[in-house]
Amino acid sequence: MSLPVSKRRREACPRLIWRVEAKAWALLGYSFLAGRHADYRPGSPDLRLVQDALNEVQILTVPDGAPTLSAQQRWALCAPTGSPHRFASDRLLHTDLAPDNVLVGERAHLVDWAWPTRGAAWIDPAILALRLIAAGHSPRQADAIARTFPSWKSADLVSKCAFATANARL
């Protein structure tokens, strides 16, 4: 019997080993991960592994005081007037789910957290859907994969449309 994700050791991201800060720069050292970049093309066996890793991250919240932008700040200039509040929440978002930011071995790992963001959990599946379309999936196929995430299924259509508009304008 497998434990719920909240009870298992989280492995979706490499473990931070050390951190050095100097002159407004932060250098981070992570544990080594063997793997290759993810394949997002239709039919790829990597897709299930990517979904598993992203599902694991979906439950994480940003600690109070952590220096991250909010999703409202990230997309405020491009979002429809009055809509950035729809992106708000306390979930930790990767926001750059390009295939080269996912290493695949026995499982998938999310790497290169250059744009960590605090916001609604459904935003990362939306970003993944955009990457899937770029890799050859139809919008219907990408939406079917996004619908495997509880956060995407529970997000309202107005919020999703506002985010789609913000990304199109971006």
Image: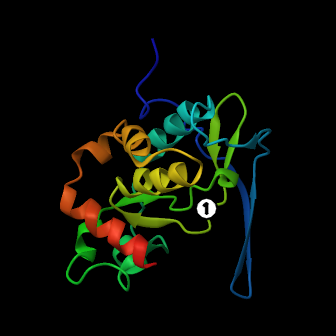
Answer with the quarter of the image where residue 89 lies: bottom left
Judging from the image, what secondary structure is the residue with disc 1 in? loop
Identified at 60% across, 49% down, the residue is: 135
Label 1: few (<14), some or many (≥20) within 10 Å? Answer: some
Q: Is residue 128 above or below residue 164?
A: above
Is residue 169 shown left or right of residue 32? left
Question: Callout 1, which amino acid?
Answer: Trp
Identified at 39% across, 55% down, the residue is 61
- 108 w.r.t. 101: above or below: above
Tell me if residue 115 comes above or below residue 137 in the rendering.
below
Side of 136 where 39 appears, left or right: right
Which residue appears at 37% of the width and 86% of the height?
A: 77
**Which quadrant does the N terminus fall into?**
top left
Q: Position of residue 162 (x, y in %)?
A: 27, 69
Give the percent coordinates (x, y) of residue 70: 39, 73
- Looking at the image, residue 104 sits to the left or right of residue 10; the answer is right
Q: Which residue is mark 1?
A: 113
Q: How many marks?
A: 1
> In the image, what residue occupies the spot 56% across and 61% down?
96
x and y percent of residue 22 in the render?
A: 75, 82
